[in-house]
Every structure is written in C-alpha cells, then in structure tokens.
Image (spheres, rainbow, N blue to C red):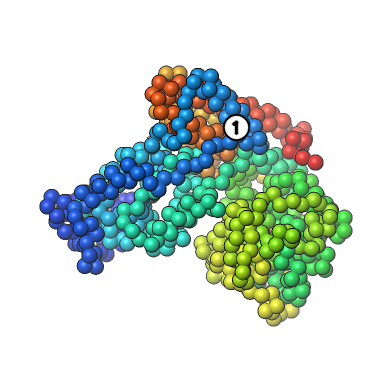
Amino acid sequence: MTKVFENNLEFFREWNAELHQALVSFGGAGENIVAVDDDWDLELDGQRLYGMGAKLYANAQVKSYWEQQANRLHVSTPQPDPAAPEVHEFFMSTLRRATDANVTFFENRADLRAYHLVVFGVGLGEHLSALANLTNCKNITIVESDIRHVHASMNTFDWRQFKERFDPADGCNFNLLLHEDGVLVGDTIRELIRYQNSAAFLDGLCMFQHYPRPMFQQIAGALTDPTNPLVFSPGFIHDELNMIHNSYFNLSKQTPRIFKSAKKTCNVPAFVIGSGPSLDNDLEAIKANHENAIIVSCGSSIAAMLDNGIIPDFHTEAENVVENFEMLRIVAERHDISKIPLIASTTVHPDMPGLFDDVTFFYRQGISSYPLFCTADDAAIDLCTPTATNLGSGFSQAIGCNEIYLFGVDLGSRSAERHHAADTPYNRGDMEFNWHLELSKEVPANFGGISYTHFSYLEAKLTHEHLPRYRSNGQRYFNCSDGLLIDGFEPKHSNTISFDGDGTLKSEAITRLRQNFPSYDGENFKMAWNGAERLAINNRLRTHLTAYVGNEKADYNSTIEALFHIAEHLPHHTFRENHSDGMTTEMQIYRGTAENALAVAYYFLCRVGNDEERGVFAAIVREEIAKFLNKLFDKVDAFYNDLSDPDAAQPMTIFDER
C-alpha cells in the first residue's frame, strides 16, 4: 500500500503541484483505509462509505448503471438548418444515399460509446476504469468535493496509469475538479464540454454518481436543464467570413484607436444602459447622476438617452449585422451622434464607424477575425456577447469602474406588450420589431414577482453573472432594471442612487482612458494580412482534414475516429499566436459549420445496429464529409481571392442584407 501511495504522490506532484501540497497535508499512507477480506473500504468521520469492499460495490454499481443506461444525455434528431446551406446539403445527401442503400436507423442508440463522461465522486476510484472501458470516452471529468477521498484512493488506485489512458495526443482530456462550490463546478464542466475538443459529440454523454451528495445532484440537474443548453452552435461559415470581411475593411480603411483594458480600478461608477421597457422608469435617476457616472449606451438604448437629453460618454456595439448600422443611421437623423466615442468590435458593419468621429475598436475572442487581426491580449473585451448589454458590462469592467449599475437590462419582459423602452426606434415606429423568441420561461424578477424570458436571454444572464463571480477586482454590482433577477447584481431602485462630486473624477477618468487607447495604422494591417498566405493555408487545411476520411477501406470504428480527428483539428479556443501549423484563422472559419455536419454524422452512425449496414453507411459518411469539406474550401478560397489585394478589394454585397 505504501508504494502505491508514494507513486501516486509523485504523480500528483508532477501533474498538479497545488493539489500535491494539499494532499501532503493529510498525512501518509493507510489512513482511513479499512481491510475487507481481499478488498478495502473507506472510513471517514466514523462512517464507512461502502459497507463492503470497494471493488464489489463498484462492480455492482457500474453493472446496474450500464444495464439501465440511466443519466445519459441524448440530443434530439438533427434537423437541416436553412441558415447553413452546406450542412443542409450534407444532411440531405447523406440520408438520401442511406435510404437508397437500405440502411436502417434505430430510434435509440445502437452504439453505446460516450465521447464525454462526467463522474461524481472518487471514493476509492474502483469505478473509474470500468466506466472508461464501457464508454470508451475521450473526455472524462471527475468531480469531488472532499479531498480526503482522493487522498484515500491513493492507497489502492493507480492514478498515473488511469490518466495516461487519456493521452492529449489521441485527442483525450482528463479533468479532476475538487471544489465545494456546486455552481462553480457546474460552470466549469459546461466550459469543458463546450471547449475541450468538440461539442459535436454531445449525444450519449454519461453522468455517473458514485455516492449521493446534494452538490452532485445540483450539478447534474443544471447540466440537463433544457432552458440552459450545454452547447450553443458557434458561427456558421457565412458569419465567420462576415467577421473577417468587416474587420478587413474597418481596419484597412479607418484610422481608429484600439481598446486597451485598464490595469486597475478607478473610483468612478458606470451606468450600463439597455433598452428594455423598465428603462423608462429610470431616466430621471440617470439624468440626475450622469455627471458622476460614466454613461455607457448599448445598442438601441442610445436613442432613448439622446431623446431624453442624456449624452452617453461611450456608445458600444458588437454585432456585425447591417440592422445595427441602420438603427444608428436613423438615430443620427434626429441627433448629432458624431461626437460620442464609439467602442465597437472590429466586426461591426463597415459603414457604422463613419457615423462617429472618435472610434475605438476592440477584438472579439472566439471568432475567426481574432487570431488574424488582434494586436494585443488586452485589446479584447471579455464576456461581450450575446447581447449589447453584455458588452456594456464587460467594457465597464475592463476600464476599471468601481461600481456597475444596470438599467433597462430586462432580458425579456414583465409583459409581452412592452418589448423596448418607449424612445427606441422600435417603439417610435422607425424600425420593425417582432419577438423572434417566445418568452415562455417564467423566472424570478429583480424586484420580486415574475418576469418572462427565453433560454437565449438566460445565456446573457449567465454571462453577466460571470463578472461578479469570476472577474471581479473588488467592484460592486447593482441591477436597477425591473426584468429578471441577475445573481451577483444587488437589486437597487434607481431613486436610491446619489453620488457626491462635481464631475471632476469622471472627466479625469475618461481622459485617462481615451489616452490609454493606442492608434492603429496601415502598418498594423499590413502585418496582419497576406492574401497569398491565406490562400495557401486554406488549401493546406483542406488537404489535412480530408485525409482523415480519404481511406476507402476504413471501417465503421475508424470512420468515427476520423470524425473525432477532424473535430480535434478545429479547436474552440483562439489565440493571437499562430497555431503550430499556422491554420488558426481557417480552423475558426470551418469550425461552426463543420461541427454541425460532424454532429449529424455521429448521431446517425451511432444508430446503425447491423454490422454490414454500419460498413455501408460509414463509407457514405466518409465520402460525404470529404465533399462537404471541399465545398467549405471552395467558399473560403473564393472569399480570399476577392480580398487578396487590399487596394482593389471592395465590400461584398453578400454580407449586406439591405
């Protein structure tokens, strides 16, 4: 036992020095381990965990779990999405050929492998290898709230050997989460599933609870909550190319400044202004305190501010769609917005910056334009999507405001009859508005009662909540809106806000901030863009990806592995530094669309039960995936050719839906 313990201690020293130190503090080998015949039990706080041998208990538990197939997540049957014509064509062609070949698909999964496995509870670890063998998982996440379990398992379980089966070189990931905060652990698991390799293979995810604990049940419930999906589809290829297109023309034709986050907090609060209906109740309070708070208008709220005599100190925009430009153009017909400093993503419509004299761009992480054009790590604004107010909050945090107040951030509505503040272009009749999302979800409202929302707004809520939970530098957070309750933002009625001062602190802070934003010039763009290189890299990526499905003799299992390899080569995270093979931008362009096609292929492959038909369908999938990847290549190749010469390139009408 002592030798096993010492070997494990050395493993944890090499793998995680902080965890190693924590484990050392619990003493040496043998403590809390009780011999049971030729097996072991774990005794903590005077109680035994198993009441029998750990191996006997784990074997029976895993056997029952696998027979019942409980706590597995199965995605709904994929549907062709007209917004992604490449995926739609792949979907229809693949299933048409399968029908012609008389391939039978089962309603339930015939292939019981699981790409993702989440295990709640370590105990003595005897269940871990059995679960990994049964699921053949690529990503394993083990959750434990009591470090004493890990310490005890080091006496009997070989952690090094177990982790080595999850070799990153084979596209595998090993995660061990030790924490007592269920919300934090749940958020971490969600991020791991979304961003470790691929969420395309969510279907069949397994969750296994080794022993009961309220925290484990809380996390499992959160992961299966239908109002908060584990994954959201990343941008399709049209969106990704649009991001590059807009960034290309904004940076090559403008003379902007580039955002730079503050290194410390300033003693000035920020008012983040959304355009929810409750904003109408707070206009007087905003006006009364505007001299001592930095006013950040978000999206259409700029109209309500100006119509009520409040000039924002900054206006923020992140979306790439032409509608945001059209909205601002309409506002500019009534008010002079040119002197308001614009804080915008490089991806906004290229006509938008022309409405403002003072333009500062930031870089949006997680999209294809980021690794291509980003000039510095601190030139990004974290947590800037999915709504305009998320950008406003993220910007206020990044410039160091000591307090952040939300106004009109309703993220839904108390009433379906009121969707925006009165003086927005939508309620003035300048622009049409229809709820695109049914507000069918009842949630607690900020000042009590019920508000109505949709799961997409709940994503915006969660993004706001990341600021106080994970990003705070001592800031305080308040919500003055009368929409849904946002955890971490203290509900506060606007009539209770009062600041002392003559506006000097605010004025000085804004001056420092704007002086801190460096200039962007033509040399920056020339360093970022090389049309010939982009064309060559796109060709290299196509060749690399299609090689995975190019083997005509590959069988069913190797076809699934090929899908895994393609996904592994299209990572979610984007960094400024080039990928080792120089394909980072192109990987991002392909990623969202490819993930959707891979998810379709994986779903149907796992529902073919006959061995002969599996081989037939696997061959169809390989051929169709190769065709699909070549079509992505063709689209990117044509796009890059049009932009190869910046002096001759013209904005593309395919991205302008007016």
Q: Residue furthest left?
A: 37
Q: Position of residue 543 (x, y in %)?
A: 53, 25
**Within-10-Å neighbours for mark 1: few <14, some 14–19, many 20+:** many
**For the point 33% across and 50% down, which residue is it?**
15
Instruction: Say which of 1 and 361 sits in front.
Output: 1
Q: Residue furthest right?
A: 333
| Residue 137 visible somewhere in the drawing | yes
Q: Position of residue 330 (x, y in %)?
A: 84, 53
**For the point 87% across and 55% down, which residue is it?**
333
Could you tell whether 653 is left or right of 8 in the image? right
- Mark 1 falls on what kind of element? helix
**For the point 76% across and 48% down, which residue is it?**
323
Instruction: Say which of 267 and 100 sits in front.
Output: 100
| Residue 477 visible somewhere in the drawing | no
Q: Position of residue 616 (x, y in %)?
A: 45, 20
Instruction: Say which of 389 and 503 sits in front.
Output: 389
Decide: is 492 above or below 253: below
Could you tell whether 156 is left or right of 655 in the image? left
Q: Position of residue 544 (x, y in %)?
A: 51, 28
How many labels, in total?
A: 1
**For the point 54% across and 30% down, which residue is it?**
541
Mark 1 residue type = Val
Instruction: Say which of 260 and 626 sits in front.
Output: 626
Decide: is 611 above or below 247: above
Decide: is 516 above or below 574: below
Decide: is 218 above or below 506: above
If the image is split into quadrants, where does the C terminus sit?
Answer: top right
Classify residue 450 by image quadrant.
bottom right
For disc 1, the marked residue is: 87
Classify residue 372 by image quadrant.
top right
